[in-house]
Image (cartoon, rainbow, N blue to C red):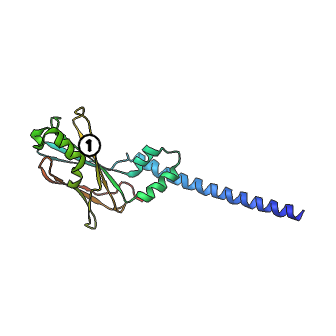
Amino acid sequence: MKVFNKALCFVLCVLALSCKNDEESKLDDSDIRFRYFNLEKQGWKSKRHLQKADGINFEATEVPIQYYLLKNMGNSDLIKVDSIYEVNKRERVIEFTFEQDYEEDLLQEKYTNLNYEKSVEYLSFSIQNDFTVVTSKHDTIACTGALFERTFKIAPKNKLLLFFSGINPNDHIQLVYQDKLFKTGTLKFRFKDPILKL
């Protein structure tokens, strides 16, 4: 009988501890859900920063990496999404678009002094060298990658996704674009507030 009582106590202790762990994970999950809910209600993106030069509109918008994680992984396991975010939280993604005032194709030779194929090649392989980020501590960080989204002359806007690494998630940044494609000079876009206060 003593052995049965000890075994019963052991099973009850294990059950009590596992219930406590389930309650803790539910609290963690609800906290994460609340943070992502607030981020979604903010509209996911930072304010758009617009500059105009030589009849071309340049727009920079910061997008949180949580947006891309949720888009790819879904929201069924937010603890996993959040753990991947924690590993990559020093990454920044900026959407950069440019469009001509009259919605003409900016990759034409009259705008770039390159033939169409060379303009596409430049946007696909070399433009990342034209972008840097300056942090509030005046550190200059080079663009680690750029993805040019081709529209094949269907839409007048051209869009790039720019990737930067090693930036404090709560740091203020300034995007600096040395425009070598359209020769408009240096453009600066200041992101005053981080997207999400952590």
Q: Is residue 117 visible?
A: yes
What residue type is disc 1 on?
Lys
- Residue at x 17%, y 36% (from the top left corner): 105
Dot 1: few (<14), some (14–19), or many (≥20) neighbours within 10 Å?
many
- Residue at x 36%, y 54% (from the top left corner): 195
- Residue at x 37%, y 60% (from the top left corner): 90
Picture coordinates of residue 26, whole percent (x, y): 59, 53
Q: Which residue extends farthest right? A: 1
Picture coordinates of residue 128, whole percent (x, y): 24, 52
Q: Quadrant of the N terminus?
A: bottom right
Is residue 77 found left or right of 124 in the rendered image? right
Query: Height in image: 130 above or below 55?
Result: below
Q: Is residue 100 visible?
A: no
Is residue 103 found left or right of 35 in the rendered image? left
Judge by depth and name the residue closer to the eye, 148 or 92: 148
Picture coordinates of residue 160, whole percent (x, y): 27, 46
Query: Height in image: 188 above or below 98?
Result: below
Is residue 66 found left or right of 117 in the rendered image? right
Judge by depth and name the residue closer to the eye, 108 or 1: 108
Q: Secondary structure at mark 1?
A: strand
Total count of labels: 1
**In terms of image quadrants, where is residue 142?**
bottom left
Query: Height in image: 143 above or below 157?
Result: below
- Residue at x 16%, y 42% (from the top left corner): 118
Q: Which residue is mark 1?
A: 159
**In terms of image quadrants, where is residue 152?**
top left
